[in-house]
Amino acid sequence: MRLLRPGDASALTSAYARNREYLAPWEPVRPEDYYTETWQAADIAHRLVAAETGAGYPLGLFAGDVLVGRFNLAGIVRGPFQSAGLGYWVDGQYAGRGLASAAVRAIVETARADLGLHRIEASTLLHNAGSQRVLLKAGFQQIGMAPRYLQIAGDWQDHNLYQVVLHD
């Protein structure tokens, strides 16, 4: 796993093409342009600007040259909050192998040791048991349920909310 680079737009576009149907129940409805290399290159560039300022970190999980997972530590707020949000997915062909769990644990440790964050938050659809297991294995605790929290697959859907506190 590493920070995405501008040259990763092609790999990311290919990953989205392979996983479009697999990810559809878990993601917002995307415009058709989202699945193009142009869109992905612009998104990576935007997120790398955020990385330069410490506001977020776009990460890719690779098997050789093939991108097999996307992880975003985003919305970092400093000051008394010291918090970030985490979003992620793993390629359907690689799901269930523990890759997401290992990657999230590594992100938690980096956030604690290198970024000085106090907490990370994440959310899952109520029926996304796999993602819930990933978070629990990485030390997250469920802190609530938010009705109609995010628009996913075209509908406003309820989400379980999780956090991991990194420092006592």
Image (cartoon, rainbow, N blue to C red):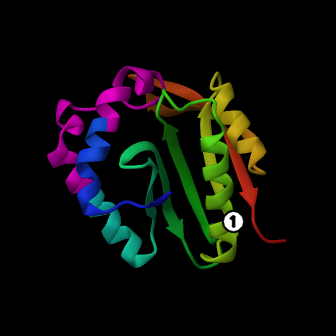
Neighbours of disc 1 within 10 Å: few (<14), some (14-19), many (20+): some
82 magenta-colored: no
Which is more toward the observer, 12 or 126? 12
Can you see residue 149?
A: yes
The percent coordinates of residue 97 (x first, y second) are 63, 34
Location of residue 3 (image quadrant): bottom left
The percent coordinates of residue 102 (x first, y second) are 66, 49
Q: Relative to 89, is 76 above or below? A: below
Q: Three-letter amino acid code at disc 1?
A: Glu
Position of the C terminus, as image quadrant, is bottom right
The percent coordinates of residue 33 (x first, y second) are 17, 36
- The outermost residue toward the right is 168
Disc 1: which residue? 109
What segment is highlighted magenta in the picture? 15-43
- The outermost residue toward the front is 64
Q: Relative to 55, is 63 above or below? A: above
Residue placed at 53% from the left, 26% from the top?
157
Q: Relative to 91, is 51 above or below? A: below
Residue placed at 48% from the left, 27% from the top?
92
